[in-house]
Amino acid sequence: MAIYSDGIDNVRVFELPAGIWGDGQSFDAPRTALVKWRSSYSDKFYQVYVNGLYSGTTLESGQRQLIVQLPSSFSVAARIEVLAVDAGDFNKDFSNEFENFISDSGRVRVKMLRGQQLSINSVIEIYSNGGNGAIDYSEPVSDSPIQVWSSWQDKDGFGMSCFGGSDFGYDGAAAVGLGKGSFGYGQFGFDADSFDWISSQLGKGVYKFGVKIIDEIGNEDVVETEDITVIPAAIPAEHLSVASFDKVTNQLVLKIF
């Protein structure tokens, strides 16, 4: 299993027209773009990720373009990445390789492990300090309590279940599987089961989050994150056009219209 970013260049993104007015002017299709690139590989497939999320895979190794959906955001530019993958991995999602996209978008990801010591009816609430000071536990920032388990799962990874709660000697028989879950968070040989919570777009600040776990009879436990510095990306420029380009000096001049 391998992904390749070297050898891929000239990545370009084009707006797609949705129609043409009577005067010949076109109007763009909302939230849709054509991504094109060049590659030095001849035997790879290509995947496109938008803001770190898998958006699609080419159908054959010679394909160098793909239409993708864009998020609805008027304050943060969409970030697009093209990767080459081996033929055997063309349908695998490598989103976990793009942790940087979350911080670049002004969002924070909180990753949580879930072991079988958490009852099936446990819920989680997320609290925040709002970017400054102590965490405010009066109002959660998560939209609603997060259900830890959507359904009963008897085994969730080697060393992660409770003694007596699984088949003796087969603690990891129904584990997520090596390379399929959150590798590095569980015991080597089996991935631990985990799930993520992603915040809304945040303003500039030093954030801290509290994760409150509540079981079915009301017992509570709280785990707090370290300080997380959030610096949102700049608002993308608009109304720019190319005034000139000097091939000798490789200098590009833009103008605002």
Image: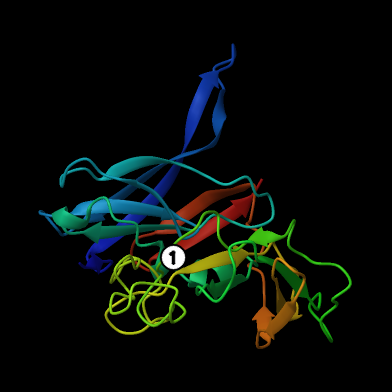
Most foreground residue, 44 or 25: 44
Whether residue 208 can be seen here:
no
Most foreground residue, 217 or 90: 217
The percent coordinates of residue 92 (x first, y second) are: 29, 55
Most foreground residue, 103 or 215: 215
Left or right placement of residue 142 versus residue 104 in this view: right
Which image quadrant is residue 64 in? top left
The percent coordinates of residue 106 (x first, y second) are: 65, 67
Which image quadrant is residue 82 in? bottom left
Identity, as a three-letter code, of the amino acid under mark 1 = Gln
Whether residue 185 can be seen here:
yes
Left or right placement of residue 24 versus residue 238 in this view: left
Q: Quadrant of the C terminus?
A: top right
Q: Quadrant of the N terminus?
A: bottom left
Residue indicated by mark 1: 251
The percent coordinates of residue 233 (x first, y second) are: 63, 67
Left or right placement of residue 17 versus residue 199 in this view: left
Q: Is residue 221 shown above or below 12?
A: below
Q: Residues within 10 Å of mark 1 (few under 14, many from 20)?
A: few
Residue ID at (27%, 80%): 189
The percent coordinates of residue 39 (x first, y second) are: 21, 56
Residue positioned most to the right: 138
Residue ID at (58%, 72%): 118
Residue positioned most to the left: 43
Left or right placement of residue 71 versus residue 247 in this view: right
Instruction: Please tell me how many numbered marks the rendered image carries.
Output: 1
